[in-house]
Image (tube, helix red, strand yellow):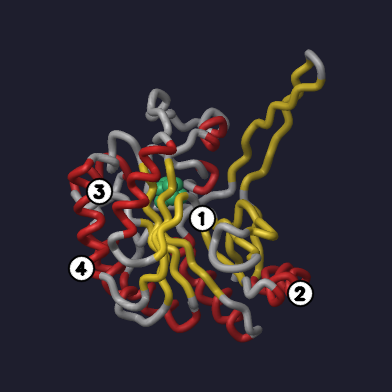
Amino acid sequence: MKGLIFSVKRYSIHDGPGIRVTFFMKGCPLSCLWCHNPEGISPLQETVNQTNKVGEKEFVSKEEVGIFYTVENIMEILDKEKVFMNQSKGGVTFSGGEPLLQFDFLLEALKACKANGYNTAVDTSGYSLTENYKSIIPYTDLFLFDIKHLDDDKHLEFTGVSNKMIQENFRLLLECSKEIMVRIPVIPGFNDDEVQIEKLKQLLLTAKTKSLKKINLLPYHKIGTSKYKKFNITNRMENVKPPSKERMLQLKEIFCEVGVKVKIGG
Ligand code: SF4
């Protein structure tokens, strides 16, 4: 069995505790307007044009996005980074795209990681069958779980999918005694108004269990948008400005009322 992965990040410090190796798996059922990993959306291997400039001259070369890995390949990569991961109490994170879109491979990879003593994290949009989450729970130490918007219409409009299954899976994970870090992307004009912020805070206050360890507020940024052209995706948020530092600090204060650690950024 093989999994399609578009990036492997070593020495990652934003995808869970300690120093981690993060595998970015290809394919996502969502199409968030602000996505900064557009290369992760298609579940297929893609060939795109890469333009490089040397002086005044431009050179166009072909770039393959997505490489197939076996579980053994994953273990070989982790083996090389074992010392750093152990010393820092880190581990391995499966991100994307949406890692559960390649459920069979993810399950096998998680089982192998646990069998080799690695701490495991899954960074998920929450949009996969509840049965799939139930299957990976025994092999996952930490879930990084995105909550984007609580109104279904708005969620559908900005991400392309309903939030009903996501909310169901969130409740399941809060009850499963594994650690959860909630990630809220703060997107101006989408979920940063007072009403929505209050709703998100209330959800976390009322649904909170011992599993909820941290809230990450991820400010909208434009870093990934330079890739949109390469992947033939229209940037529909071109005119949206990132939230100010002051606004992010205000939001941090609001979410601190939930009673868990709140961090701006990953
Ligand atoms: S869930 Fe994440 S990877 Fe998928 S489209 Fe949204 S931002 Fe991009």
Give the residue pinned by disc 2.
83
**Residue labelled 1 has its Cβ within 8 Å of some atom of ligand 1:** yes
Ranked by sequence position, the earlier of labels 2 and 1 is: 2
Q: Disc 3 and disc 1: Cα gap in Å?
A: 26 Å
At mark 2, the secondary structure is helix
Give x and y (percent) for residue 180. 40, 70
Q: Amino acid at mark 2?
A: Val
Of marks 2 and 1, the one in the foreground: 2
Q: Disc 2 and disc 4: Cα gap in Å?
A: 40 Å
Would residue 187 appear left or right of 63 to someone viewing this image? left
Q: Hey, which quadrant is residue 137 in on the image?
A: bottom left
Of marks 1 and 4, the one in the foreground: 4
The residue drawn where x is 50% and y is 54% is 266
Give the residue pinned by disc 3.
197
Q: Amino acid at mark 4?
A: Thr
Q: 40 or 224, which lies in front?
A: 224
Q: Dot 2: within a 10 Å radius of its alpha carbon, few (fewer than 14), some, or many (20 or more) residues?
A: few
Q: 249 or 2, which lies in front?
A: 249
Q: Dot 1: within a 10 Å radius of its alpha carbon, few (fewer than 14), some, or many (20 or more) residues?
A: many
The residue drawn where x is 65% and y is 69% is 70
**Residue labelled 4 has its Cβ within 8 Å of some atom of ligand 1:** no
Ranked by sequence position, the earlier of labels 2 and 4 is: 2
Give the residue pinned by disc 4.
206
At mark 4, the secondary structure is helix
Q: Disc 3 and disc 2: Cα gap in Å?
A: 41 Å
Q: Amino acid at mark 3?
A: Ile
Q: Amino acid at mark 1?
A: Gly
Q: Are marks 2 and 4 in contact (CB under 8 Å)?
A: no
Give x and y (percent) for residue 11. 69, 60
Ranked by sequence position, the earlier of labels 3 and 1 is: 1
